[in-house]
Amino acid sequence: MIDFTEKKFGIISLGCDKNRVDTEKLLSIIRGRGCEITDDISAANVIIVNTCAFLNESRKEAIETVLECSAYKSGNLEKLVVCGCLPQKYAAETFPELVEADVFLGVNDYGNFFSALEKSYNGERVNFVGSGNGGYLPERVVTTPAHYAYLKIADGCNNHCTYCLIPKIRGAYKSYPMEELISEAEGLGEVSELVLVAQDITRYGIDLYGQKKLKEILQKLTALVNINSVRLLYCYPDMLDDELIAEIRDNPKIVKYLDIPLQHSEDRILKLMNRPKGRAEYLSLIKKLRKNIPDIAIRSTFIAGFPSETEEEFEGLCNFLREAELDNCGFFAYSREPDTAAYKLKGQINYPVKKSRVKKLYEVQKEISRKKMNGLIGKKLRVLCDGIDYDNNCFVGRAYFQAPDIDGKVYFNAHSAAQGEYLDILVERTDGYDLFGRTEDYNL
């Protein structure tokens, strides 16, 4: 029997914020065993790499990270564990080849972490993918700054977009029990901003309760005294009904910000993607949101170079951006992923063209963002302080239209500011993406 309390554990989390929450729950399992967790990977006896496998680039990053970590076996490292999406989807291909890894665990197997590790210390390479039941894990070790945290309310996806591997990695959509999530949120302590995440938060509750329950869980979360505000990420456009829009508008604790992954604007491409609605419906939804919630900030993501996308359809997407004037956008070149329906589509577009189209989309959005940011110069913004930016010798934070890690920031001077504190910042300039300013009482 191995005494794991004598071992030091280090972890590297790759991929999205949903994966980060999984990492935090695995850390809680490790800490619950009485083990030491270290930020110094070189000092770790056990290194865990929690992987992403959504795109070829993320799989490449995961494998490279594992190989880089294996170099520590010349020092303190005894066991290298690979978990998450890469083993879940590609264990058959990677376990025999990636011999540097000692243990493989899938997305539902975190509860078997120590059983697998014990077996590995007894001399075997261990593939435990598929050994767990994927049950809800309530405890976690938060790895974000203390003033904000993510709450993952569901896993999996039922949307089956033709370019996406998520349903084949994570399985069908599965909502977590509401009472467990409320308890988890209460256990986070004082939180300035709670960020709700799932592959699609707007479908929360349908599988578990037979009806949409996002509005109800929002009401319960915002009733908690330790939660100052709630931000919503990944809301599918076909599920944003009048009832939910009204809740976002009327609930003062809900940040007036929505991340709505549209992925394209042209009807033929959207149909090929198996996406809901079309260009007219998307523009109508954006108009409706702005009418009902005048200050709403809308973020989205788009894919360029989907198979058979014509120059005219790409220009249609550029014009859609100009018409929609979204606040923040992310753009990605279509990645041809085996085992997806889009992989077999005719009219695959070569990479230089896809790359060029992504660049053009960013140029279009840059002009939209610059116009919006210039309109804020001379105005005061309520800003959540994220801490100190030592490179720029100032404080850094976010306005309501800026989500952690994916949007711009506000850099500001003040006599004092505490992490998690809200301050009124006078905007003095912009670079078109970030904002720069000061508190009104601060004099240079």
Image (cartoon, rainbow, N blue to C red):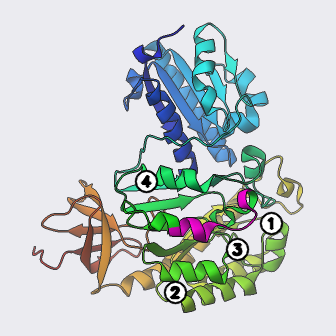
- Earlier along the polypeptide chain: callout 4 or callout 2? 4
User: Where does residue 165 sit, x and y in percent of width and height?
Assistant: 75, 50
Q: Position of residue 409 (x, y in %)?
A: 37, 67
- Residue furthest to the left in view is 443
Indicate yes or no whether the magenta region holds residue 212: yes
Residue at image location 47% in from the left, 24% down from the top: 33
Residue annotated with mark 2: 293
From the image, state whether disc 1 or disc 2 is nearer to you. Answer: 2
Q: Residue furthest bottom?
A: 291
**Residue located at (69% from left, 33% from top):** 87
> Which sits earlier in the primary sequence, circle 1 or circle 2?
1
Query: Would you name the residue on which mark 1 appears?
Result: 273
Q: Which residues are magenta?
A: 208-219
In the figure, residue 109 lies in which quadrant? top right
In this rendering, the count of numbered labels is: 4
| Residue 417 belongs to magenta span | no
- Are the two marked residues, 4 and 3, in contact with CB atoms closer than 8 angstroms? no
